[in-house]
Image: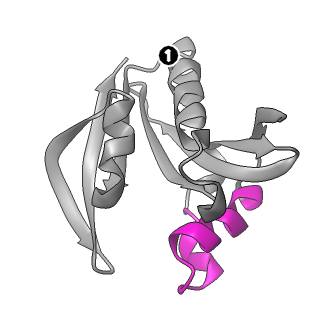
Amino acid sequence: MEIEIREITAPQTWALRHKVMWPNEPLSYVKIPDDEKGQHLGLFVENELTSVISLFMDPDKNVQFRKFATLKEQQGKGFGSMLLKHVMKVVKENGGNLLWCNARATATILYEREGLHQTDTSFVRKGILFVRMEKQL
């Protein structure tokens, strides 16, 4: 099985983000106002875009990852973990200090397995609980 992780454009992430994360919302809902300022990575399985993630570094070199999504039919196969491990490596190589995200509460176990921990910050969006998770690099 051929697996490749490569940089992609923000528009290349939108369809997968929409399908996985917010299928009942308009496509515009998954677009981030600063998408053009982010770094976007895609994991391809046999040349099919399977997972996406978007990275945003602030001036203090803290990196937020957003809109991390894997096709439902490919979940549970380790592709998300592969992509997240790759992100940690890239962020560290680029001088990042802290990696963080606002995770759906139902997905915190994936992030905990990769060394992120839950903080006391949380919020609800569209009835879904999100928890801030982070890891010092």
For the view shown, which residue lies furthest in the left direction? Answer: 120
Q: Nearer the viewer, residue 10 or 106?
A: 106
Query: Is 23 placed above or below 119 here?
Result: below
What is the x, y in percent for residue 67?
52, 56
Which residue is identified by label 1?
Answer: 92
Query: Is 42 placed above or below 96 here?
Result: below
| Magenta highlight range | 11-32
Measuring 30% from the left and 34% from the top, which residue is drawn there? 134
Query: Is 106 placed above or below 42 here?
Result: below
What is the x, y in percent for residue 30?
56, 69
Q: Quadrant of the C terminus?
A: top left
What secondary structure is found at the residue carrying circle 1?
A: helix
Measuring 31% from the left and 32% from the top, which residue is drawn there? 116
Query: Is 115 placed above or below 32 here?
Result: above
Is residue 103 rendered magenta in the image?
no
Chosen colour scheme: one colour
